[in-house]
Image (spheres, rainbow, N blue to C red):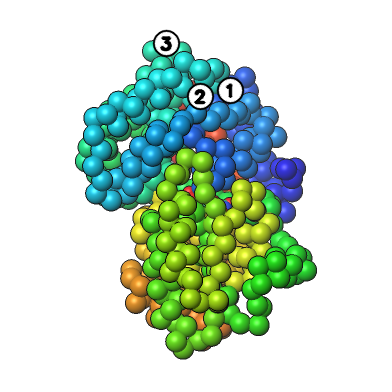
């Protein structure tokens, strides 16, 4: 983990000084994060970087992961899909089992936090322990909440309303709630293995490992194998463009311990790619950060064709590397891309194919987009801004009705 001081060379010393100033005011307070997986997906990605930096700033930040079996995670994956607008039947047994696992975890976890910071729906019902343990409780939602299925959102809201505050990633996800809502967008860490500069030899070595050529354009989507990331749609886009431009497609990603659907999606993607040696379907193990970094840096264009997206860290990661990005205009992605300025936003396979062809044929236009994209990420979506928002949020819990500007 790099020293917090190193971030000054990217964001300026005054930003770092302010973080120390705010962190000092939290002295003696334990911030306890709780989520459902230590690896895989955006939440784990953020906490892996956030917790050590908070510690460096002098904040006593901790991180616990709830335990769940396959049945629990298949139910929470149904919740996840239903919250993203996929029509899925969820019965009362599912809700009961979900609560049972939450209550089992609640008896095992040591609620040592002065602020208990619960991430996403999987551990949301831990709040039932509140009367016993007291403390301040925040629920942080990383999900695209634009069209949630009614039964699941109603169920969740009965828990959200018991927290002190709810945090969402984008204005479009805010709800009618009884508790204050705070908007904090996620971020990337520019100094992590995932995002730091890499020497060209390292990038070449990763491409060689997978047999990908640097002589022809590389189009990439990095994502967990999940229907909502639409990997089959990406293959369709590529096939349309391939008729005109001799490019290669890389679909790379691993799984997450709280996502049981990944292998099924992977098999479907492999089947769709089987006849084309220029499609590379790479199932990556956890801790493939340097590999992902190299694949993103080697890419000519990066796609993120999600059907729903809470934020889409992969978009920020690509833009930070000054890559032209074409992404669906869904959820938090539209915070990151201003269409035709800092990237391209699309709504369909046809639209994505149209712009992919254009960017591959017009490198100067692609370069302008990616230049603006990097500046936008630097100004808005680096981890230092995210930490500042969280520190202010934690402090606001102890300041009654004071106005806190985030
Ligand atoms: N990621 C990874 N390995 C993979 C696939 C994804 O490390 O095999 C990372 C990716 O680089 C990004 C995060 O996991 O940092 C995914 O976050 P995002 O918000 O894009 O999507 P989520 O998986 O949370 O839906």
Which residue sits furthest bottom? 244
Q: Which quarter of the rendering shows the N terminus?
A: top right
Q: Position of residue 79 (x, y in %)?
A: 33, 40
43 over 250 or under it: above or below = above
- Residues marked 1 and 2 touching at CB (< 8 Å): yes
Which one is nearer the viewer's eye here, 297 or 214? 214
| Whether the residue under disc 3 has CB within 8 Å of ligand 1 | no
Q: CA distance from mark 1 to mark 3?
A: 18 Å
Is residue 316 positioned above or below 92 on the image? below
Assess whether mark 3 and mark 1 are in contact (beta carbons under 8 angstroms): no
Q: Which residue, given by chain and number where applicable, does mark 2 sit on? A: 115
Q: Which residue is mark 3?
A: 132
Residue at the (65%, 67%) spot, across then down: 210
- Depth check, mark 1 against mark 3: the one in front is 3
Residue behind mark 1: 30
Q: Secondary structure at mark 3?
A: helix
Label 3 neighbour load within 10 Å: few <14, some 14-19, many 20+: few
């Amino acid at each position: 983990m790099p020293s917090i001081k190193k971030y000054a060379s990217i964001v300026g010393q005054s930003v770092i000084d302010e973080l120390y100033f705010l962190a000092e005011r939290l002295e003696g307070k334990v911030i306890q994060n709780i989520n459902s997986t230590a690896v895989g997906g955006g939440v784990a990605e953020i906490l892996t970087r956030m917790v050590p930096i908070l510690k460096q700033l002098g904040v006593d930040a901790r991180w616990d992961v709830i335990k769940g079996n396959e049945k629990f995670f298949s139910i929470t994956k149904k919740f996840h899909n239903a919250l993203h607008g996929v029509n899925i039947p969820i019965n009362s047994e599912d809700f009961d089992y979900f609560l049972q696992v939450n209550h089992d975890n609640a008896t095992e976890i040591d609620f040592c936090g002065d602020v208990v910071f619960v991430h996403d729906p999987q551990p949301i019902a831990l709040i039932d322990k509140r009367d016993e343990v007291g403390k301040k409780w925040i629920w942080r939602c990383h999900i695209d909440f634009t069209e949630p299925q009614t039964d699941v959102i109603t169920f969740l809201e009965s828990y959200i309303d018991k927290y002190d505050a709810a945090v969402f990633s984008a204005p479009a996800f805010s709800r009618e709630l009884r508790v204050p809502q705070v908007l904090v967008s996620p971020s990337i860490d520019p100094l992590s293995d995932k995002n730091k500069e890499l020497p060209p030899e390292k990038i070449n070595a990763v491409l060689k490992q997978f047999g990908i050529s640097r002589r022809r354009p590389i189009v990439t989507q990095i994502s967990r194998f999940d229907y909502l990331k639409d990997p089959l749609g990406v293959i369709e886009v590529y096939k349309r463009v391939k008729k005109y431009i001799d490019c290669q497609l890389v679909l790379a990603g691993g799984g997450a311990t709280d996502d049981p659907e990944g292998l099924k999606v992977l098999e479907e993607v492999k089947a769709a790619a089987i006849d084309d040696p220029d499609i590379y379907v790479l199932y990556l193990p956890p801790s493939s950060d340097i590999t992902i970094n190299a694949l993103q840096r080697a890419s000519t264009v990066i796609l993120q064709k999600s059907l729903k997206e809470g934020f889409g860290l992969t978009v920020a990661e690509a833009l930070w590397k000054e890559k032209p990005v074409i992404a669906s205009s869904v959820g938090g992605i539209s915070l990151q891309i201003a269409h035709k300025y800092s990237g391209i936003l699309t709504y369909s396979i046809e639209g994505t194919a149209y712009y992919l062809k254009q960017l591959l044929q017009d490198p100067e236009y692609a370069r302008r987009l990616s230049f603006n994209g990097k500046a936008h990420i630097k100004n808005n979506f680096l981890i230092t801004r995210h930490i500042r928002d969280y520190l202010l949020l934690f402090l606001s819990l102890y300041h009654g009705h004071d106005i806190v500007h985030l």
